[in-house]
Structures are given as C-alpha cells and as structure tokens.
Amino acid sequence: MNLDIFYLSNKTGNELANLLKNQWETVNCYETSFQDSTYLKIQISDINSDWRRVINSRRAVENCLDKNTFLEIMQINNIPCGDLDEEKIIRIYEVLICDLSSISIKSTKLGKTDNKAVYIKESENAKLVEVAKRTVYLLGLDIGMVKIVLTAKRKLKVVGVDPSPVIRSKDLENIIEMIEVMYFTEENLKEEQIKLGADPEFMIFNSKSGKMISASEFFPREGTVGCDNIRVPNRQQRPVAEIRPQPHSCPLELMANIKKALDSANRIAPYRNVKWLAGSQPVKGYSIGGHIHFSNIKFNACILRALDNYIGIPIFLIENPATATKRRQKYGFLGDYRFKEYGGFEYRTPGSWLVSQEIAAAVLCLAKIVASRYPQLSRNYLINVEAQRAFYQGDQNYFKPIFLNHLWVNLKKIDMYDKYKEELEIIPKMIAAGIYWDENTDIRKAWKMASVTRKIYKESNKKAPTTTGTASGVQFRNTLSSTPRNNGHGNNRRNSSRRNSSRRSININEISSSVAVNANSQSSSLLNNSPTRPPRRSVNIANRIISPGQIRRAYTVH
C-alpha cells in the first residue's frame, strides 16, 4: 500500500523521515508550507499497489490547530473539553495514539513545589485511553498526542491535541513498526477470509394495548435467541430481544442464519396479538441496534472510518431521522465499536436493520465489501464540523447529495460490487426517493416467517405476575402477590398458562356472572387457606376486584 505521512518538520518529524528512508528504498520526502509552518510530506511508494492511505491529512491537522474547530468537534461528540486555566488541575496526562492504539501514557501530578511525571500502562486508566482514542479519531488523525487533565472534581477534560508531537525514541520505534503494518495491509487483507456476524435487536409490543412486553417474558438471556443486558429500571425485566446467528464469511449465508434464528424465536413466542419491531427507537427511551461483527481482520482507524462513511452514512439516510436522532443521544455515535472475546470486533453505530429482509441483506453485503476493500474507500466525508453536526441532528439533506454524487459512485468502482449488486440496489433507490424504513411494521411479516399456530398473549402469561393492570376493560389487582413463594402459587401460575394454551380465549365480561356464583365457594376458600392471611368473613365477591388467577380457578372452559 502507498502511504503519505504529513508531519511537522521538527526533531521527531526529521527522525521519522530518516528512519523510513533507511528502511525502504522507495521513500521520498518533501517540504511544504502549511499555516506558516514547514511540514514534511513523507511518501512511501508501493509499485505493486494502487491503494493509498494518508496518515494525518491536512484537514485533520487543521482541525487540531484551529481552536474553535477543535472545541466544536469535541462538543458535538459530547467529549468534555476546555482550557487549562478553567478550574483547578491536579494531574495532566499526555496520551500518544497511533492508529487507534496507545503507544505511551505520561502522567504528571501537579504538586505545590514540583511536578512528578511517570509513565503508566493502559490497564491503569482504560477510560482515559478511550477518551484519547476517540478524540484522535473524530479529528481525523492517525497519530496524535492528546493532552487530558484531571480536575479537582475528578473529571477528565481534553485540553488539546498535538498532531506532530516530539516523542521519545522508544515511542518513535513503535510508530515505525505500526507504519510497516499499514504498508503491508493490502497483502495481509487479501490472504484473510473475513467472517461476518451480527446480533441485531428488536422489541415486542402488545398490538392491542400498544404496551411494551419485556423480551425476558419469552426468551432466555443466552443462546441464539435471547435478551440484551439492558433492564427496565428497578426491575429484573429485560425489554430488548436479540438474535445471535452463526457467523459466516458469506453475507447471504449469514442472512440464512438470521432467518433461522428469527424462526426459532417465532416458535418460542407464537403470539398473534403482539408485534415485533426493529429500527432505532421503536419504544420511547429504549434504543436498539444492529451490531455487525467482524473477525479474521486487524482493527485500525482506517477500517473504522470506512465503516462510518460507507455503512454509517447509507444507513443514516434510510433510517427514521426522528427516532435515530433520539438514539444517538446515548448510542450509535460515530466510531462506535467494541472488541469481542473471540478476537474480532463489532461495529455498533447502525440502528437495527431487521426492519426487512431486503434492507438486512443490503446492509450485510455492504459490510462485506467495506471490510474486504476498506483501503480503497479512504474518503472521509465526516471529517468536518458541519458533517458531524448533521449526523447527530438527523439532517439527511446534508448527506443525500454526498451519497448520490460521490459516496455510492466510489463504492460502485470496487471489484466486489457486482457480486452483490442485486442485494445492494434497495439502498440507492430508497435514498433517491426519500424513503426511510418503517419502524411500525411487524418484522415477522416483513421476513415472511412460516405460519405457526399462534396463541393469544395475555398479561396472565407472564412469568412474574404484575401488581396492577387491565384486561378487557376490567381493572384487576393481584391479591396473591403477597403470598410466600413456598406455597407454589408462582409455579402454579406458570404451569397453568402452559396447560391453558389450547383453550379458547374468554372475555372477562362474559364470565363475570359465573364468577359471582362460583367464587364464593372456591375463591374464598383459596384465600382463607393462605398461611399469611387470617380467615375472612363471607362477602359478595361479585362486587370485589379479583385477580386473573382466581378467575381461572373459578371458571375453566375445556
């Protein structure tokens, strides 16, 4: 791969140029003027490659040197920033980042008489390093020294970034080793068979009441079909469902595995009066994602930028801007990734593309192309303040001409495009027509899932009974909720819902008169025998609110 390195003509810049010249015969170095300073443009040529990567572009360097631009980019991305003299500082960190890897971390403790500086490991302050990596990435840099302060209030603040720092010889050697890895990227990439995976999320609604139903009512935490770790506040319920299909090197095979996982979920929860919804935020306050996993590939800043530009922007243009903007307040920000235990990583910026089979197939095929040819997709449309602000504000009009006139034109030049052309066509068609995905469509219909005998979901089918609720217009209260678990009520209710799954649905209003007749002998006896309640005097239960459990015991239709 051909490399262009832009570095200030200082001590480290000249050492870097000389060391690279000694290592490669195809290195050329030129001086150029930029913002009243002399910079070096170091070129490492590869006659066998058409691929080119620019390390620290002029625009990225300008983002660092212009104070207003620097502060705006930090603020847009919710990164705490400021000046050294804004409040009391107790420690200063200088974090050297290269290609989203930390090279060194210098920690200086400010004392009353003198300052003590030491070098620390990344494991000693992981949060600090993540802030530094994110800062360098969003400014468009590949190499940079991030200065972060720790205030007296124990808060971290980014106060500046040096795109051409003077560094130790040890650190410079490490950077040269990483530049060598960049140089051989093309050769290594062609030898690897990149594998794709995914764990897209969806949510479940009661189609009649419009209320959310927690995924943990149906699915376990682990397995091919499960629940995300997000919980309902102050409860054990997990509202977000997640599928984890088998990964595959072919995106179409991965699609088939996703379909199998959804069919499995449909068999576990075969209810016809519920809806499965995907997108960005189908429920207010609950954001969901369409995380895409990559393995057999080395993670770096170049691939992350390609994912943001060539997957993040196209999905941005077909998702619902209203809900997507709300989601990005906490999730789905630019450069959102996470390393996984199997050695790969997941890209977390997109919302849940499970909205339809066609969109899911297009996204996964696009992911395969970008991951396999990311050095050829090096154009960064998100490097300026205007683009990043438009992304977080959901301004699709800003990116639409960029997509139609530049981004998709570049993508169509990639040799792999024709292989997945049919699957990809839906993306430019939707964007050109100004259509975005529908987050109110039941994804079971969109995925044409096999018809199964679907039951009616009731509040009484829940694994854990609620304290209050409504059913068929009649208010009820769970009068058994205070009964100890060792009396078997919890298990009986769960088993009863399974036994009654084949019975016809009954309207509570239809059986109210029967309950009034039968409940005196059955339901009162049940309550009086509870070990935690004293005997009650006989009352007319017809005028009293009763629980669904008592109704089932009082009136059962076979």
Image: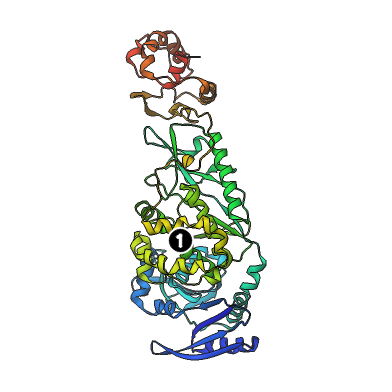
* Drawn side of residue 77 relative to residue 120, left or right: left
- Residue at the image position 63 percent from the left and 68 percent from the top: 189
Q: Eyeballing the image, is 220 above or below 192?
A: above
Determine which residue is flagged by label 1: 312
Q: Which of 299 and 164 is in front in this view?
A: 299
- Residue at the image position 65 percent from the left and 62 percent from the top: 193
Q: Eyeballing the image, is 322 above or below 60?
A: above
Query: What color scheme is it?
Result: rainbow
Give how far across and how far down residue 212 sits, in percent.
Answer: 41, 38
Give how far across and how far down residue 507 sits, in percent.
Answer: 39, 20
Can you see residue 151?
no
The quarter of the picture where residue 432 lies is bottom left
* Drawn side of residue 234 relative to residue 398, left or right: right
Can you see residue 373?
yes
- Residue at the image position 50 percent from the left and 51 percent from the top: 360
Q: Nearer the viewer, residue 65 or 267?
A: 267
